[in-house]
DNA sequence: TATAGGAACGAACACTTGTTCGTGTCAACT
DNA sequence: AGTTGACACGAACAAGTGTTCGTTCCTATA
């Protein structure tokens, strides 16, 4: 494939920047003015070239109908997940009261390609070192999906009633009892009666920002 | 603040959805058609109301000049970081050859509020369990900033020459030797001569998508 | 030198889109 | 009944914007 001309690259860059700034695409005349091109038809000509190489998509009969195909600055599949509290060994985890309250205190934004699905998600900040056996550190953010049951082998946040603590383990039904298996393969599982645990949510992702 | 009328809420919802679909804002007539409103001036009237409550921003003299203020579907501070390879105990990590090659194989998108800064970043997928002492699991993605020196206490990817392996540890200069401290507090540090290590990059973040 | 095609030019044209204005409806209040 | 204000209507207008077309410039190739 032939290289883009300098002008075509400049147009592409401008569109990208414009979209980043403005939330709406530029017009042909915006491009013309910015690049000092004397005619709109030149812009149109070059846009057609860009379109043929499917670097952009153009929506005819529509003003400002330019979309970036590479979408590196276009629309993202981003979800904002509310960080509704903390999770620590000795505390029950907060209940996702108003998942829809979009103006919550804090949110974490993740692209959906990291997430199998995005419904019923909430996030908690980990306090303390009680979950190092799940390879989760103090200060990490865990993403959970709210659910009260789970399949064997899923990692879930469970409240252990008699010990009065929350933990993150792989969960296995084994008849009358359950096995809670640490993610860290070198550590031993916990066995406890099935009615001694309450599943709080399923672990979906862990994000650690290193200071 | 008074409630929005049903019509105003419908308009707001439509704009939001349209923006999610289309990469460009709707026109007044798009809104009119969708909501079955008989006149563009009604839409204009209601948009003015929405604007007064600063739920949207309107760019006059510009077609499709509607921007959402809540920006829940607006522009995000998202960076796409290239996943340039794998990191494993026995292998040197790949060098970020062409960081600018935007059409690389895979990228991971993160919002910048998780990242102190976004320059020189690259990502590696972790293979194997050799980094559990840094609370990093097989399959995790580590974000590194390319640098060859570091401050005491920073977690860095180091190549240990005589052992011929890569590891992620907190790094401390201690005179002639260096101390490599696992993140897991229960594990012992490694001491080795300073000229036996090569710093590959500084750990910035860890992302784990749980299957 | 002649020719062809890529790239650019300028202007006119037509469609798209926001704005305005006079009017109408309806409920709440005086 | 009269008044007011929020909301809606329809139509005409004006500005914004994409498209088209004839033309020119330039370089490569025969």
Image (cartoon, coloured by chain):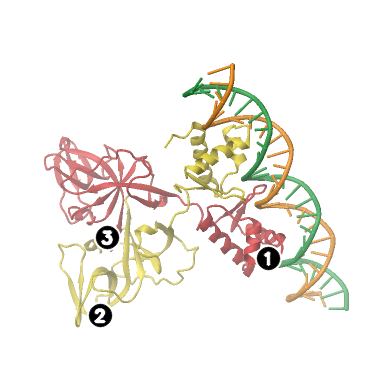
Chain colours: A red, B yellow, C green, D orange
> Which x, y percent locates residue D20?
77, 53
Q: Above or below — where is A4 with respect to B138?
A: below
Pick the front one: D28 or C26: C26
Q: Position of residue B114 (x, y in %)?
A: 35, 58
Pointer 1 indicates a residue of which chain?
A: A
**Residue C20 image-quadrant placement:** top right
Q: Tell me the tag on residue B136.
A: 3
The quadrant the C terminus of chain A occupies is bottom left
Q: Give A72 or B66, whichever is nearer the viewer.
A: B66
Q: Quadrant of the N terminus of chain A?
A: bottom right
Residue sitting at 64 percent across and 67 percent down? Answer: A7
Determine crowd level at label 3: few under 14, some 14-19, many 20+ residues with C-alpha closer than 10 A. many
Comparing A135 with C28, the one in front is C28
Secondary structure category for the residue under label 3: loop
The mark lying in front, picked from 1 and 2, is 1
What whole-number distance in Å separates the C-alpha atoms at marks 1 and 2?
58 Å
- Residue that badge 1 annotates: A37
Q: Which residue is mark 2?
A: B196
Q: Is residue A157 left or right of residue A8?
A: left
Residue B204, numbered circle:
none
Q: Earlier in the sequence, mark 3 or mark 2?
A: 3
Q: Chain of mark 3?
A: B
Number of residues whose C-alpha sits closer than 10 Å to that of mark 2, classed few (under 14), some (14–19) or many (20 or more)? some
Quadrant hosting residue A164: top left
Side of B19 where A191 appears, left or right:
left
**Local crowd at mark 1 within 10 Å, few (<14), some, or many (≥20)?**
some
Name the element at disc 1.
loop
Residue B181: horizontal and vertical position, in percent? Answer: 20, 69
The CA span between labels 1 and 3 is 53 Å
């Amino acid at each position: 494939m032939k290289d883009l001309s300098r002008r075509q690259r400049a147009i592409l860059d401008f569109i990208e920047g414009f979209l980043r700034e403005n939330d709406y695409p530029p017009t042909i005349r915006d491009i013309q003015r910015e690049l000092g091109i004397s005619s709109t038809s030149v812009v149109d000509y070059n846009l057609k070239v860009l379109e043929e190489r499917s670097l952009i998509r153009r929506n005819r009969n529509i003003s400002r109908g330019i979309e970036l195909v590479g979408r590196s600055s276009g629309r993202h599949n981003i979800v904002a997940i509310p960080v509704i509290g903390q999770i620590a060994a000795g505390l029950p985890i907060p209940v996702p009261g108003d998942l829809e309250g979009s103006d919550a205190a804090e949110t974490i934004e993740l692209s959906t390609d990291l997430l199998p699905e995005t419904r019923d998600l909430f996030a908690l900040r980990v306090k303390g070192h009680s979950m190092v056996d799940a390879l989760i550190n103090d200060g990490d953010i865990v993403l959970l999906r709210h659910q009260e049951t789970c399949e064997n082998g899923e990692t879930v946040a469970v409240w252990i009633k008699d010990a009065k603590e929350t933990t993150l383990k792989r969960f296995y039904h084994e008849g009358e009892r359950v096995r809670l298996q640490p993610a860290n393969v070198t550590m031993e599982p916990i066995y406890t009666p099935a009615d001694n645990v309450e599943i709080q949510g399923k672990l979906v992702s862990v994000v650690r920002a290193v200071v």
